[in-house]
Amino acid sequence: MSKFKFKKLLIWEKALDLGEDVNLLIENFTKKEICNLSSQLLRAIDSVALNVSEGSIGQSNTGQNKFIGYPIRSLAEVVTCLHKANRRNYITQNQFEKYYDESFYLMNMKLAFRKNLK
């Protein structure tokens, strides 16, 4: 039995998985991007799971609804970073499409979750 409510949420688990995948993805970025795009991408993807967990603790549905909006915005930031990485040829088109699709799927999960909170 989990003591934390967020551990039961599939969206939290999926956000963790995507974060770990993106962490591996940035290993191919150039050294000059370590403090730039790769750092921004990691902060954005990590904030997705972090905000889901934060919003699930001691929150009413209204409060949780507010926190679910944060990771949705963070996913938009992730997608923009993926576009930049693709344009700069740090990732392949196939990698871009894979992570873009996973981000889109996770965003839709979060939107459905938020709709059920109302």
Image (tube, grey):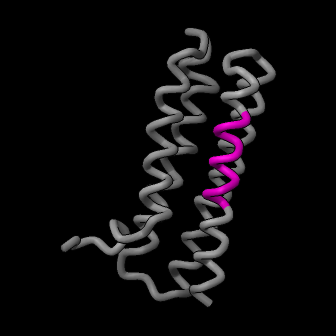
Q: Residue at x 59, y 16 (%)?
A: 29
Counting the numbered discs, the total is 0
**Foreground pick, 34 / 14:** 14
Residue 52 versus residue 18 in the image, above or below: below
- The answer to whether residue 100 is above or below residue 6 is above
- Whether the magenta-drawn stretch holds residue 92 is answered as no
Seen as rendered, the residue at the extreme right is 87
Task: State left or right for residue 104 relative to residue 63.
Answer: right
Rendered location of residue 22, percent (x, y): 53, 34
Q: Main secondary structure of the magenta part?
A: helix
Q: What is the x, y in percent for residue 117?
A: 57, 86
Residue displayed at 49% across by 35% down? 21
Q: Where is residue 40, by image quadrant?
A: top right
Residue at (54%, 44%) from the top-left corner? 45
Q: Is 47 placed above or below 60 here? A: above
Residue 96: % across, % down: 71, 31
Whether residue 39 sits left or right of residue 3 in the image: it is right
Residue bounds of the magenta highlight: 97-107
Pick the front one: 39 or 9: 9
- The residue under the point 43% across, 49% down is 16
Q: Quadrant of the C terminus?
A: bottom right
Q: Quadrant of residue 93 in the image? A: top right
Quadrant in which the N terminus is drawn: bottom left
- On screen, residue 78 versus residue 42, left or right, reads right
Query: Residue 68 placed where, x, y %?
Result: 57, 69
Direction top: furthest residue: 31
Residue 10 location, quadrant? bottom left
